[in-house]
């Protein structure tokens, strides 16, 4: 009998054990820029909402409270220009990594069916296809979908790891191509609030989808925008039939966002000020780290958005990881994200101002 784990790759971060040991030995301590884990406080009003809902003896509903569904709709309309959606087209999820990993299975995909993912991508897209035992194909050209005939297509903008942002015309191409082959287009928009050098757009916007969300899902997370990664709070929105199917399966599977977390989500989605404040923090850290990396010989590519800098010195990514580890800086090698990333590293902005400053100082010293 073949266990599920035999279909999965090795967990990528396990390969950084030695680099982390070396970096941790720096006299001034480790600067860990390898994982996009928020370090700034969860807004106090969200903590208050969580506490106020802590007396929660009954089971939450998989569909979420009406308050939460209305907050999701309000956010999508206010921030992303979505129009015409109703409460039957939104669904909270237990962090979006869970949704990404299980979406092919929840859709009923299996062997002989195809999931398309970006060529340089968040590893969980691939893992989700493997869990369902589907064929996973990397593809960056919407025109190629006609030959692949996929059932599910993932796009990601702003993208993890490289931060590229798809324009409205590019998004339209993906929507049209997916519809032409009858595939569900799942758009991972979790980094949408962090667009630096171009405007991010949602597939839920009428200018992108032509006034219909048929065949479309948008995936959103509160982890980065609200420093709520520990809450495991996200949601999907889009095609009513797909959302209804996901809801039905998730009810049977017991996939429910905890009630207190739903209350905190509603509060966070109703507020834009804390997002603007967090955006400014990351902009400040980006402005410190980018020139320091460039001075140390790295070239920054893409990186129009998201919380990472996609860097190369035109060498194997593991050599770059080792070089930075000697400076006490831990980063993610690009080979985590596909063969196309083998000469790149991903450097996260998710560290305190003090640690980002320490990294910049060390890079400046190395640059001479």
Image (spheres, rainbow, N blue to C red):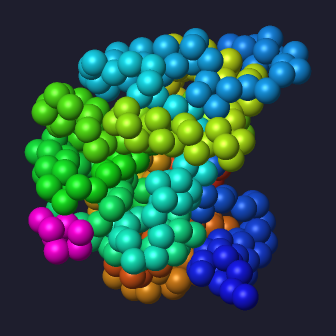
Q: Is the magenta stretch mostly helix, strand or loop?
A: helix
Seen in the picture, residue 307 relative to 181 is either above or below; the reply is: above
Task: Name the one closer to the observer, 153 or 229.
Answer: 153
Residue 233 pos. (x, y %) = 62, 35
Seen in the picture, residue 364 relative to 12 is either above or below; the reply is: above
Quadrant assignment for the N terminus: bottom right
| Residue occupying the point 46% across, 35% down | 244
Q: Can residue 3 be seen in this view?
A: yes
Task: Name the one closer to the observer, 89 or 93.
Answer: 89
| Residue occupying the point 57% across, 18% down | 68
Task: Name the one closer to the observer, 63 or 269.
Answer: 63
| Residue occupying the point 87% across, 16% down | 55
Residue 28 pos. (x, y %) = 75, 60
Task: Name the one closer to the observer, 356 or 191.
Answer: 191
Q: Magenta stretch?
A: 143-149
Query: Magenta segment: does it hold 317?
Result: no
Residue 276 pos. (x, y %) = 45, 23
Seen in the picture, residue 335 relative to 211 is either above or below; the reply is: below
Q: Is residue 223 visible?
A: no
Side of 28 where 65 appears, left or right: left
Query: Magenta segment: does it hold 144?
Result: yes
Side of 174 where 235 appears, left or right: right
| Residue occupying the point 65% across, 84% down | 6
Residue 80 pos. (x, y %) = 31, 26
Seen in the picture, residue 191 relative to 5 is either above or below; the reply is: above
Number of numbered tags placed on the structure image: 0
């Amino acid at each position: 009998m073949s266990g599920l784990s035999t279909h999965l790759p090795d967990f990528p971060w396990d390969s950084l054990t030695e680099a982390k040991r070396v970096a941790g030995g720096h006299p001034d301590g480790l600067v860990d820029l390898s994982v996009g884990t928020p370090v700034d406080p969860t807004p106090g009003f969200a903590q208050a909402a969580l506490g106020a809902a802590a007396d929660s003896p009954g089971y939450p509903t998989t569909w979420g409270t009406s308050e939460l569904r209305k907050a999701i709709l309000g956010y999508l309309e206010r921030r992303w220009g979505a129009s015409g959606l109703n409460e039957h087209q939104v669904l909270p999820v237990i962090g979006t990594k869970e949704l990404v990993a299980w979406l092919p299975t929840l859709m009923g995909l299996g062997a002989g069916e195809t999931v398309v993912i970006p060529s340089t991508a968040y590893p969980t897209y691939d893992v989700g296809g493997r869990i369902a035992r589907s064929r996973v194909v990397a593809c960056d050209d919407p025109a190629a979908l006609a030959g692949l005939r996929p059932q599910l297509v993932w796009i990601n903008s702003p993208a993890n790891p490289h931060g590229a942002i798809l324009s409205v015309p590019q998004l339209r191409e993906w929507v049209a191509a997916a519809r032409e082959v009858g595939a569900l287009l799942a758009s991972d928009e979790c980094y949408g609030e962090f667009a630096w050098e171009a405007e991010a757009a949602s597939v839920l916007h009428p200018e992108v989808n032509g006034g219909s969300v048929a065949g479309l899902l948008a995936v959103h997370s509160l982890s980065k925008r609200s420093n709520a990664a520990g809450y495991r709070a996200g949601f999907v929105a889009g095609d009513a039939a797909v959302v209804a199917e996901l809801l039905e399966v998730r009810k049977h599977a017991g996939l429910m966002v905890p009630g207190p977390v739903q209350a905190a989500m509603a509060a966070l989605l109703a507020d834009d000020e804390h997002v603007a404040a967090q955006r400014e923090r990351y902009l400040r850290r980006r402005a410190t780290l980018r020139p320091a990396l460039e001075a140390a010989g790295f070239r920054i590519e893409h990186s129009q958005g998201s919380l990472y800098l996609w860097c190369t010195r035109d060498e194997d990514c593991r050599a770059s990881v080792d070089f930075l580890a000697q400076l006490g800086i831990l980063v993610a090698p690009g080979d985590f994200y596909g063969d196309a990333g083998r000469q790149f590293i991903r450097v996260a902005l998710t560290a305190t101002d003090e640690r980002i400053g320490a990294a910049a100082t060390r890079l400046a010293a190395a640059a001479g």
